[in-house]
Image: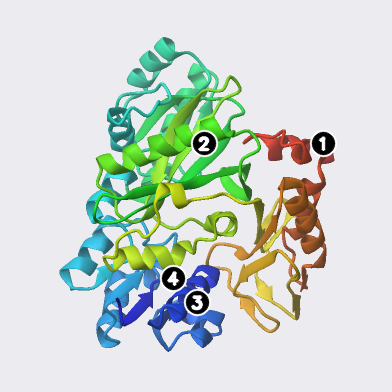
């Protein structure tokens, strides 16, 4: 087991990892930028070390500074959290070359699944259904137009190395395709350092369903049910739930077994997710694989009773999976609402600033993962996520009722947040019936205008 883990991240995920390490008896090192000198994770860690200025490139993405901090503090492992360097294959290689364990899969796994084209090819070999699309990257507008004629519209452009909606464009005509190709390539280059994009047939109004998996170094892999992440705005998830309202036991087993088959093919050995799109006709298609812990891992923990962050650390330390597939039981339902420091009434404008007053909800079946407190100043340099409210119930309806109550209790002044917006969605009649898809937010906002 590790003696000391450095957490190469910030915010609520840094707090979450520190808690897991403490319960495992592992000492922790927090790193922070100059803008995060008052962040809560510094108070909880055994040691804290500044790694640079406010900009991510100078701190949380600065591999040299992070590795120096690990060397100085004699850390024997690094947990990357999510975002930043969590899916950076080079960072994983640097950790390995320095004799420091990267808490995650191999660099080869990260690189393979980070290349969306290669990831699709790999999953195709595993027998996972794919969305019809280009066999590789599309460079010229001539090639794009030939594919469009063959496949028909609507189409979607995606960055080969992408995620989070960057480098993604929907096209309904040749004119739109040509202009979108240029902008998508430029955006992908800026966001990921790789301008390559590929084309897929657009699955209209799909469900976004992901399967949680866990694997050790000895070939043992299990799946831990699915999460429905269809409530999104601009491809950024807002509300997630498990089980999905549209996934029955038969489909759950099928998705899970395919996810395991794909993971086995690449010798995956950590926790991760395999993501699918479900269309209105009951078909499903592989979308991507995330090789890290997800923001929404919390709801799977609530219904399975398995601490995924602890499990991730144990697997990285070389332990065998102590859980077999038959040991996995989904009990009840769980919902997560992401609370962002944004103003929903003003185009979701980010709202950094000083928190004068803060009260987070509590009570039976309520969990809040956060790093904020009264007196904390939300910096303007990073993602706007400031808290995750998670509720559980014996069934979906009970979890939803609990969430409505919890969101009504969430108070933070004078910062504007998405808590009230999430509350409105939870109360929506279509959402309550489980009748939603990835385009739900757009239609919801149209109704409000």
Q: Are marks 1 and 4 in contact (CB under 8 Å)?
A: no
| Image: 428 above or below 347 | above
Q: Position of residue 396 (x, y in %)?
A: 72, 46
* Disc 2 secondary structure class: helix
* Disc 3 secondary structure class: helix
Of callouts 1 and 4, the N-terminal one: 4
| x 26%, y 78%: residue | 76
The residue wearing badge 4 is 9
For marks 2 and 4, give the CA distance.
33 Å
Residue 378 occupies quadrant = bottom right
For marks 2 and 3, give the CA distance.
31 Å
Q: Nearer the viewer, residue 28 or 327?
A: 327
Mark 4 is surrounded, within 10 Å at the Cα level, by few (under 14), some (14 to 19) or many (20 or more) other residues, namely many
With 93 as the anchor, is 321 left or right in this view?
right
The residue wearing badge 2 is 252
| Image: 184 above or below 221 | above
Q: Position of residue 132 (x, y in %)?
A: 41, 21
The residue wearing badge 3 is 19
The residue wearing badge 1 is 447
Q: Of the residues tagged 4 and 3, which is closer to the observer?
A: 3
* Disc 1 secondary structure class: helix
Q: Position of residue 174 (x, y in %)?
A: 48, 17
For marks 1 and 3, give the CA distance.
42 Å
Q: Of the residues tagged 2 and 3, which is closer to the observer?
A: 2
Mark 3 is surrounded, within 10 Å at the Cα level, by few (under 14), some (14 to 19) or many (20 or more) other residues, namely some
Of callouts 2 and 3, the N-terminal one: 3
With 322 as the anchor, is 348 left or right in this view?
right
- On-image quarter of the N terminus: bottom left
């Amino acid at each position: 087991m590790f003696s000391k883990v450095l957490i190469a991240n910030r915010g609520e995920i840094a707090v979450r990892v520190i808690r897991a390490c403490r319960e495992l008896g592992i000492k922790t090192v927090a790193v922070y930028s100059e803008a995060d000198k008052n962040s809560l994770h510094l108070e909880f860690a055994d040691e804290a070390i500044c790694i640079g200025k406010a900009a991510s490139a100078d701190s949380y993405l600065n591999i040299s500074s992070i590795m120096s901090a690990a060397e100085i503090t004699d850390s024997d492992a690094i947990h990357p959290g999510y975002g930043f360097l969590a899916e950076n294959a080079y960072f994983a290689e640097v950790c390995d070359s320095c004799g420091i364990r990267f808490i995650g899969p191999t660099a080869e796994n990260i690189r393979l699944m980070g290349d969306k084209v290669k990831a699709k090819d790999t999953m195709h070999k595993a027998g996972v259904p794919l969305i019809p699309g280009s066999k590789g990257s599309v460079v010229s507008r001539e090639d794009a137009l030939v594919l469009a004629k063959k496949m028909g519209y609507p189409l979607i452009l995606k960055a080969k190395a992408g995620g989070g909606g960057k480098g993604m464009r929907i096209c309904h005509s040749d004119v739109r395709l040509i202009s979108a190709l240029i902008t998508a390539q430029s955006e992908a280059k800026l966001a990921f350092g790789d301008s390559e994009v590929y084309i897929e047939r657009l699955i209209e109004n799909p469900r976004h369903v992901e399967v949680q998996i866990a694997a050790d170094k000895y070939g043992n892999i299990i799946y831990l049910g699915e999460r429905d992440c269809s409530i999104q705005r601009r491809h950024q998830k807002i509300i997630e739930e498990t089980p999905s309202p549209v996934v029955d036991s038969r489909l759950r087993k099928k998705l899970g077994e395919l996810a395991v088959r794909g993971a086995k093919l690449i010798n995956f050995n950590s926790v991760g997710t395999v993501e699918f799109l479900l269309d209105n006709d009951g078909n499903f298609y592989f979308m991507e694989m995330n090789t890290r812990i997800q923001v929404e891992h919390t709801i799977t923990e609530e219904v399975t009773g398995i601490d995924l962050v602890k499990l991730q650390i144990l697997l990285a330390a070389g332990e065998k999976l102590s859980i077999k597939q038959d040991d996995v039981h989904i009990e009840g339902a769980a919902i997560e609402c992401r609370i962002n420091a944004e103003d929903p009434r003003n185009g979701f404008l980010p709202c950094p600033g000083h928190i004068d007053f803060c009260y987070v909800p509590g009570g039976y079946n309520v969990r809040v993962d956060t790093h904020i407190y009264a007196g904390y100043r939300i910096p303007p340099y990073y993602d706007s996520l400031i808290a995750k409210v998670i509720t559980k119930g014996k069934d979906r309806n009970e979890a939803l009722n609990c969430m409505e109550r919890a969101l009504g209790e969430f108070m933070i002044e004078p910062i504007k947040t998405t808590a009230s917006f999430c509350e409105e969605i939870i109360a929506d009649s279509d959402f309550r019936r489980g009748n939603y898809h990835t385009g739900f937010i757009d239609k919801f906002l149209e109704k409000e205008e």
